[in-house]
Amino acid sequence: MSNNTDTVPESYPMNSGDGSNSYTKNSYSRAAANVVKAKIDDVIPEKLDSTFRLADLGCSVGPNTFITMQNIIDVVQQKYQSQGLASHMPEFQVFFNDHASNDFNTLFASLPPRRSYFATGVPGSFHDQLLPESSLHFVHSSYALQWLSKLPEELLNKNSAAWNKGRVHCASAPDEVAQVYTDQFAKDITTFLDCRPKELVVGGLMVLIMPRIPNGIHCSSAPIGMIFDFLGLCLMDMAKERLISEAQVDTFNLPVYVASPKEMTQLVETNGCFNIERMEITQPGARVDSLSGKALTKHLRAGMEGIISKHFGTKIIDELFDRFSKKQQESFDLLESKYNEGTQLFMVLKHI
Amino acid sequence: MSNNTDTVPESYPMNSGDGSNSYTKNSYSRAAANVVKAKIDDVIPEKLDSTFRLADLGCSVGPNTFITMQNIIDVVQQKYQSQGLASHMPEFQVFFNDHASNDFNTLFASLPPRRSYFATGVPGSFHDQLLPESSLHFVHSSYALQWLSKLPEELLNKNSAAWNKGRVHCASAPDEVAQVYTDQFAKDITTFLDCRPKELVVGGLMVLIMPRIPNGIHCSSAPIGMIFDFLGLCLMDMAKERLISEAQVDTFNLPVYVASPKEMTQLVETNGCFNIERMEITQPGARVDSLSGKALTKHLRAGMEGIISKHFGTKIIDELFDRFSKKQQESFDLLESKYNEGTQLFMVLKHI
């Protein structure tokens, strides 16, 4: 229930539609869907009920969310069948959640017509409780938790040590900048984890898939940090050429934070309502050699074009991503070796 | 679950937005909301549960649906309080349902920020089961059931006795035309009533509000029939003046049927899953003298502009409703006296 209108979290709509820069075509979420299929087989909750309710938090507009939800339902159905419980097969109800500004019209129009579940949309931030008590058996959230609910104000404060002048992220920034990012992320994950036990039945599962940086590595040395640095450098180059102003770069920061497995573990343990059933480093499924081509640029553009356009206008977008494409190409060998370590964190939590 | 893609019912979006011809401003649904508030006080289901789930079937884009749902919740909360059960107050979850083509983005964007319920959207036809078994305690549907899920094919068949040449409705049509309308309505209400007992708990209530014609009166003598006749006559006048073609009028029919209380009673009794707890004829709340002005025309336009434009194009709309306004004015005295008999059917059904 959204009773607090003072702190409505920011939303960052992805590129919609089916164009070549659309989120649908380029997102790693589809690969994540396949990871779920492979991993959740043995971790379905034991609780039997007449309706099995599952939610995808931060579902965007599909079709990835449809694939993932159907995968999970398939696994549950197979489990019932293999245990001779086919006659007790529950009905399935899927709650598709995203911000109220998400394009639910597109989501609903593209629902698979022959689906084996009742479909419902839940508008709102997953930093609030979204559904009634004990109403969910399974929660899924893929590539959503890295988005900060808001940007720390210090980043724009010239008098703060965390003023992020000339950069768009904390990757290569001073420790003070990194710290305000880290604090905001911790706050967000804490509210996220606080809300879910209200909705999930005891024994219910939560699958979280998100980008990660390796433990003990500075963000600037991780692929995602390098990518954000490239983006910042391209913008600063453009500012030097007066295509945009330096002040515009100074006042722009990416509301994204990539955590290490250790950070996530600590936040889950502090919350205390979940057992970590499984925790793995995986690849998002895109072949590494696709980095060398346009895939990485297209992926970044699909996710970031919206917020970059909002700040800088749409005119600079093609130029910016052309520059980005060249810059990441120069460091391809380094990026490749780091990607091979795995950039995706896959967690299965059980509500205890 | 929408497993049958062959018979997707038609949807007829209302005029959206806040313009003077919008559904929001002109619909009688808002008046219906007040009727609910006044009537449901003593007919709340006895069943206690941790979550009280209610659905508005055919909710459109708001704000009427928000007012109605909040009214119902207020009544339930007052009942808990008056019975000393405040400490057992359930959480509330509202399912807003309409066709997948409904503008859910607008609905979600205009949700009251300080609401006392969890909001969810359910895309799909209420001629299908929309929600899992026994998942609802209260169903509401206002000014939705008069829309036919499809137009009988015979209306367009030149070789059929039910070919509806030169008219847009069954009001003043031959019996054969009226019969195919009646049959389609009966089929639609039957599937509607068949689906609801799957969703509603035993003891759960269903409030239906719809336009009605009096028992034993021919549709053409009822206000709603007169209004549809006026619309047909205006279109035929325009065809004679070559502003549109006669063939266009011949191939256009309003997918609306207005039933008598007796017809509804028979359909509910045939279904057999509901007790009729209450059945009343009410006024939709608009003052009768507003008929003399522009209110009736605006109301009709808000509901019908979409389907009329789709068939005839948007250019004729202003002209058509100007003519309609004059024509209904000529018969105002008759229309007024008939309106005073009440044009709205209010039913409370209990799932037995």
Image (spheres, coloured by chain):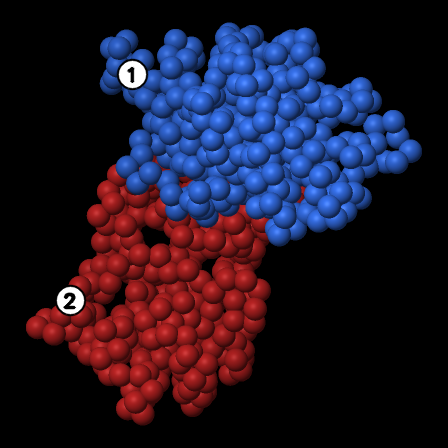
Chain colours: A red, B blue
Q: Nearer the viewer, mark 1 or mark 2?
A: 1
Give how far across and how far down residue A61 sits, in percent: 50, 54
Q: Which mark is residue A154?
A: 2
- Residue A344 visible? The answer is yes
Q: Residue furthest front?
A: B330
B195 left or right, relative to A333:
right
Q: Amino acid at mark 1?
A: Gln
Residue depicted at x 26% and y 59%: A150
Q: Quadrant of the N terminus of chain B?
A: top right
Front residue of A130/A186: it is A130
Give how far across and how far down residue A55 sits, in percent: 46, 43
Residue depicted at x 38% and y 43%: B110
A46 left or right, relative to B308:
left
Q: Which mark is residue A340?
A: none
In the rendered image, which residue does mark 1 sit on? Answer: B78
Q: Chain of mark 1?
A: B
Give how far across and how far down residue B246 sits, in percent: 78, 43
Q: Secondary structure at mark 2?
A: helix
Proximity of marks 1 and 2: CB atoms separated by less than 8 Å: no
Q: Amino acid at mark 2?
A: Glu
Give how far across and how far down residue A159 sits, in percent: 8, 73
- Residue B303 visible? The answer is no
Count of numbered circles on the image = 2
